[in-house]
Image: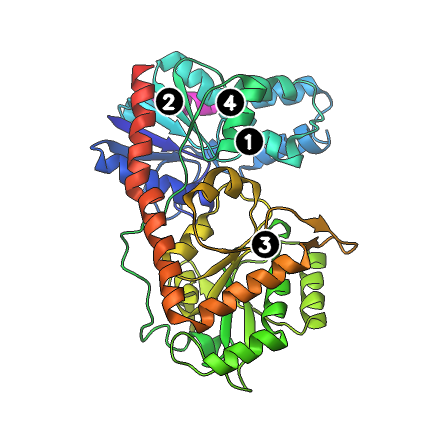
Amino acid sequence: MNIALAHFRVGETDGVSLEMEKWKIVLEKLGHRVYFIAGSKGESDAYVIDELHYLHPENNRFVENCYGKLTDYSTEKEVKEDILNFAERIENKLIKAIHDLELDMIIPNNIWSLGWGLPAGIAFTKALQRTGIKAVAHHHDFHWERDKYENPVCSFVPEWLNTYFPPDLPEITHAVINRIAQDELMKRRGITSKVVPNVFDFSEEPWSKDDYNADFKKKAGLKEQDVLVLQATRIAERKAIELGIDVVAEMQSEENLKKLSTDGLYDGRSFTEDSEIVYVLAGLEEASEEYITKLKEKAERKNVKLKFINHLIESQRTKSNGTKMYSLWDAYVHADVITYPSILEGWGNQLLEGIYAKKPMVIYEYPVYVTDLKQAEFQFATLGNTHEWNEDKLVNVEDHKVESAAKELVKTLTDPDYRERVVTHNFETGKKLYSYEALKEAVERVLSLSVKG
């Protein structure tokens, strides 16, 4: 079949764009011809419909006047007419794309999920009805999961959200990324869906130390004998990085430091009086300044050395203004352990990255982990699945869970045989359940349902 994957943008490093690339690969392996349709193409080839652009000025205006404040229009009727006119432009261009590319199926990603692109959701529905083309709606996030869309200021918006986000039509098969989303879609809209988990390419060449990244630790401000504890995610409040600080602080307890010093590290390095355990944050800072300040203050209070190194990280190895930039994979290579203390995730892509990198991990068991991933029986140091907020609006878990997790990480740092068993078990489990091969089988099932439908 000729299939188009559609989104507001492609060829970028956002989660949806990355998953679309994976779907493209497996769809092509299944023998289909695959295209991208988007508002911007980034570093990919795509059929561009300008009005779909994620930050199109007209759509930005609609978002502000529908969910923020009615400032650019005198009446709701004017907003509604403007949106419908804009939707018609997208609809006509989409129908042209369907004919130009001779499409048999279209797979919109998040276009029917969030209320961000009201015109796009309407346009895709009407284009589907006019052409009769089959569709698989791939939902990564729903509008009811976001505060932004909870209280629209225009009275027609709730009806549109209920009609088009997502539409309940026989031509559409629905795919979601976790069981919580599946249950909510059924509960709220009576729509059945299939869970297609996010995956990772476990067949890639293993990341390793090489001439390029040999100086990574030095550039990041660490000594060779230091223990590098990596937080690879973006820095955002829901990532609960404060829990990582708690764990690193506990790793520095007298008992744990004595074990590190006496036993030495898994790779033959000594842990000496000069050695430090350093918490390295590689991700982009997307949190409020207030949150970042609280993290720094907590780290200082707990005597945890914190390093922010996103200024050294790019999506791939490159040079920027003469400065050597590393990929995130280089950070994984030099990490001794990884923290993943998120309290909320749609899936957990960087959990899979850590598994692929064969690094011991400490996690918080966020809701989707409990419903979708825990059954895989990965071997992680865990902070449990319950938490509280302290007076600083930072996340807390019980002390004994932090102590247990830190002790487990220290064991993986000092016992090479145990470490190898843990990371190999996790890698093989991930490869079996969350590889491109697993995605290929899941996508094949969804397509067969769509074709039968």
Whole-percent x and y of residue 244?
Answer: 59, 61
Q: Earlier in the sequence, mark 4 or mark 3?
A: 4
Q: Label 3, on which residue?
A: 383
Q: Earlier in the sequence, mark 3 or mark 2?
A: 2
Whole-percent x and y of residue 115?
Answer: 58, 29
Q: Amino acid at mark 4?
A: Pro
The residue stretch that appears in magenta = 87-96
The residue most toward the bottom is: 273
Badge 2 marks a residue whose secondary structure is strand
Q: Nearer the viewer, residue 47 or 292?
A: 292
Circle 4 residues within 10 Å: few <14, some 14–19, many ≥20: many
Q: Amino acid at mark 3?
A: Leu
Which picture quadrant has residue 255? bottom right
Q: Magenta stretch mostly in which secondary structure?
A: helix
Q: Judge depth for marks 4 and 3 and give the one in front.
A: 3
Real-space Cα separation, disc 4 to disc 3, in angstroms: 36 Å
Whole-percent x and y of residue 21?
Answer: 35, 42
Q: Label 4, on which residue?
A: 166
Which picture quadrant has residue 24? top left
Whole-percent x and y of residue 403?
Answer: 61, 63
Q: Judge depth for marks 3 and 1 and give the one in front.
A: 3
Q: Earlier in the sequence, mark 4 or mark 1?
A: 1
Q: Earlier in the sequence, mark 1 or mark 2?
A: 2
Q: Label 1, on which residue?
A: 142
Indicate yes or no whether the magenta region holds residue 8. no
